[in-house]
Image (tube, rainbow, N blue to C red):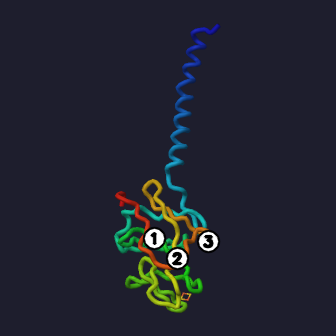
Amino acid sequence: MSTASSRWSRRSLIVPAALVLAGGAAALAWRLISPPPSRDFGGLVRAGRPHDYAVGEVKSWASGRFYMVRGPSGFVALYRQCPHLRCTIPPPVDGTFECKCHLSRFGLTGELLRGPAQRPMDRFPIRLVSGELVVTTGEASVIRRTEYDDADAFNPGPVA
Ligand code: FES
């Protein structure tokens, strides 16, 4: 048989327990919807929000080894490695990328303008997580392009 004081004591534990459970549920929900942590090449890299980029703007993400480009059709995360013999392609000058090893040239969204490379720059997958562009980097994630296609661009929709 319970006394009035023991009932009161149990009730006084219910509110803190409910708060702890609610806090845990909120933390779990936040973890599920928040972007993954930014990491170096081989991991997921946060590349900012779509509205951080003007059309035609290129931002360099050295730790992820890519350039994020906002082209007229959307976003492309271009792998810095040249599709010819794997030299690192420096940032664009006057709207084009030029590999300094053998002078292959590419447009801002990676299209091949001049060889000896035989194909466009490769790219990485992009997705939108909690309003941020997140790029999956690493050798296993490289999307090798044999030809250029405007439809390769990632369009985040009206959030941009
Ligand atoms: S490695 Fe880039 S042009 Fe040859």
Residue located 51% across and 65% down the image: 135
Query: Which residue position holds label 2?
Result: 145
Alpha carbon of mark 1 to alpha carbon of mark 2: how far? 9 Å
Q: Mark 1 Cα within 10 Å, few/some/many (few <14, many 20+)?
A: some
Tell me the quadrant of the picture where the C terminus can be found: bottom left
Residue type of the residue flagged with mark 3: Glu
Quadrant in the picture for residue 75: bottom left
Query: Which residue position holds label 3?
Result: 139
The kind of secondary structure element at disc 1 is helix
Labels 1 & 2 near each other (Cβ < 8 A) = yes
Question: Left or right: where does residue 125 sit relative to residue 138?
Answer: left
Residue located 50% across and 46% down the image: 30
Indicate which disc, 1 or 3, sits on the residue closer to the N terminus. 3
Query: Which residue position holds label 1?
Result: 152
Residue 129's x, y, as percent? 47, 56
The kind of secondary structure element at disc 2 is loop
Residue 127's x, y, as percent? 48, 61
Residue 91's x, y, as percent? 46, 80
Alpha carbon of mark 1 to alpha carbon of mark 3: how far? 19 Å
Ligand 1: image quarter? bottom right
